[in-house]
Every structure is written in structure tokens, then in C-alpha cells.
Image: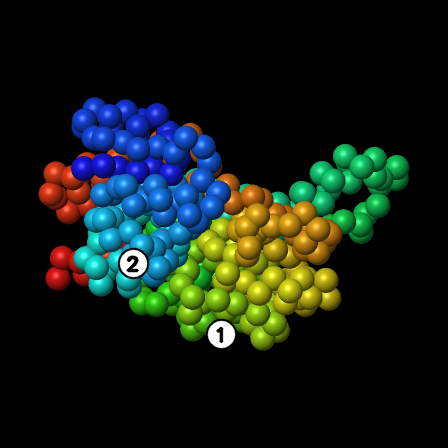
Amino acid sequence: MKIFLNKPLPDVGMELLKAAGLELLLPEEEIVSRAAWIAYCQQADVVVGIGAKGFDAAFFGQCPNVKAIALFSVGYDQVDIFAATQRKIPVSNTPDVLSRATSDVAFLLMQSVSRLAAFNFERVKSGNWLQQFQPTLHLGQELYGKTLGIFGMGRIGFEMARKCKAAFDMKVIYHNRNRRPDMEAGLNAVYVTFDELLAQSDVLSLHANYTAASKDLFDAAAFRKMKANAILVNTARGGFVREQDLYEALSSRRIWGAGLDVSDPEPMSSDNQLLSLPNVCVLPHIGSATVEARNGMARLVAENVIAYVKGARMPTLVNMEVYE
Ligand code: DGY
């Protein structure tokens, strides 16, 4: 079987694939056009998607040869899962191995915004370190005992909640498709409705899986229901948040601040008006960007590919329905 990777995996993954004796196909140069993407995928039995966005419904029609997809990400919103499942194409992702790293970035953004770290760093760089001590200028807010709202209580949300509880004794509330008694037990977390989550959170951190149905869920109407001191943290997907509404909510001080590791579209344009605000910190989608997480992801991708080639079920399969 031929395996196409649109980019090389970190070494540990490449070595596992090579040791399994698989035939690997890599592009000679960075793929920039849809035509090149399809032309490569048409040569493969299995596609390893590394930051590739092109697995839409048309893809499956254009590449009937593709029998399995292994993603180098925990999110799978870049794949039309319905179309893949209809064609009995298993799709795997990389859960768990990046939960710590991604929740670390959520925690980092929360703190960075609550203490205006990015804004203050910018002041230093631009020569605006105040000459005189000013007791009431550029003040942050403390997080001790505040309420953390988790939207999407999966592994990453759980890790974020665990850290916030340990560091700041935060009270944890969450909203999820289903209640998670397993997660409630360890965190003393309370399940709330979406509106209660908006109304009660001092920090609201997004960790849900993104689907088209969730587009712009966090819009002006949602921001109006939030507390004036609330900090929005998004390390999930940019599509959850209507950026124009967020800008208005932040610039009018309707909510207090926002920390974003994701945007819609990506990359965020350098003249995005959100970047002009002091109460915003934006990172360029670095949630899983640690050596440990990326090596774990590479290993998992290789294990999924090798399992598929051997005729076994992929260990971190997204669409179980392919076997029904
Ligand atoms: C993930 O793993 O889903 C990261 O956000 C990278 O896409």
C-alpha cells in the first residue's frame, strides 16, 4: 500500500513507518494548489494529513483510491466525516498526547490576559515603561476562587480545569453535549446550560470539537450574556467566535479580555483590529507545539497507519461507524 504524507512527520513517526516497510510518498515541494493536493492523493491508498484542509466531499469523489486517512491533529473538522463514513473510509486523529500542551496554552493565555502580559511587554519594547509608579494604571485581575467555565469537557478541557483548580482554586462549571460524571467527580465540576455558562464564567475556555453547526456560537448575543470581568480563551477553533462581535465586546469593555490561539481564518491578518486592543493576547495556533506533544502525535499517526495496513482497526479512530 502506498502512503502519502503531505509533509514529513517528526522523525519518530517517519522511522516507525519506514521500519514497517511501507511505501511512502512525499511531495517534492510544498503543496499550495488544490490540483497538486488531489494529484498526490490520487496516487495513495492512505493519506496522512498534516495541517491539510482539503478532505471535503469533493475530495472523496476525486480520490476514490483513498482507503484511510490519518490526521496529525486531534481536531477533525478539516474532514467531511459524513462523506468518509459513507464510503467506509476510516479516519484517525491524535487525542490525549496533546492534551497537556494545549491546555497549557489555554492556561498561559488566561494568565497573560488577566495580567495584561502581552500589552505590558509591548509597552516595554516600545519605550513606554512608565517613568513614575502609577498605582491604578494597567491593572490586571486575580483569578483566585473565580469561576472557570469549560465549553467542551473532553480531555483538554479536563486538563485546563485541573490546572485552574490546583493553581487558583477556581470553581469549575462546564457545558458539554453530554454530562460527564467521570470528570465531575475529580473536579467538583458542575454541569450548566450554555446560557448559565455564559452568565457565570469569569474565565470561559473553549475546548469543544468544532462542526459547522457551531459557527459563530460566540457572537454579540452571547457576549451580552457574559460578565463584564469575563475573559474568553479559545484554543479550539476560530470558527466558534464571531471575531467582529468579539472586537466590539472587547473594545466597548462589554467583556474584559480574550486570549486566542486560533482564529478564523488562519493565519490572522496582521491588521486584524483585535490586535490593536490591550486586553487581547493572540498566539499563532501553537497549542500542540511542544517536542513532547508533536512526537506523541507522530507516533500515534504511524501506529494508526500501520494498524490499518495490517488490517486492524486504527487505535484512535474517529468514525467507529465505518465498522457497523
Ligand atoms: C489539533 O490537533 O486539532 C490542533 O489544533 C492542530 O490542528
Q: Nearer the viewer, residue 245 or 55?
A: 55
* x and y, in percent, of residue 238 in the image: 52, 57
Secondary element at image label 1: helix
State how far apart marks 2 and 1 are (Cα). Answer: 41 Å
Q: What is the number of the mark on residue 195?
A: 1
State the image quarter where residue 39 is shown: top left
* x and y, in percent, of residue 286 in the image: 50, 41
Q: How is the image coloured?
A: rainbow
Q: Nearer the viewer, residue 178 or 188?
A: 178
Instruction: Report the number of discs.
Output: 2
Secondary element at image label 2: helix
| For residue 204, side relative to residue 274 (left or right) | left
| For residue 270, side relative to residue 296 (left or right) | right
Residue beneath the point at 34% across and 41% down: 40
Q: Nearer the viewer, residue 206 or 143?
A: 206
Quarter of the image where the N terminus is located = top left
Residue beneath the point at 28% across and 41% down: 43
What is the three-letter code of the residue carrying label 2? Gly
Residue beneath the point at 12% across and 38% down: 310
**Mark 2 nearby-residue class (10 Å; few <14, some 14–19, many ≥20):** few
Circle 2 is placed at which residue position? 61
What is the three-letter code of the residue carrying label 1? Asp
| For residue 95, side relative to residue 21 (left or right) | right
Looking at the image, residue 164 lies above or below residue 130: below
Quarter of the image where the C terminus is located = bottom left
* x and y, in percent, of residue 199 in the image: 54, 71
Of marks 2 and 1, the one in the foreground: 2
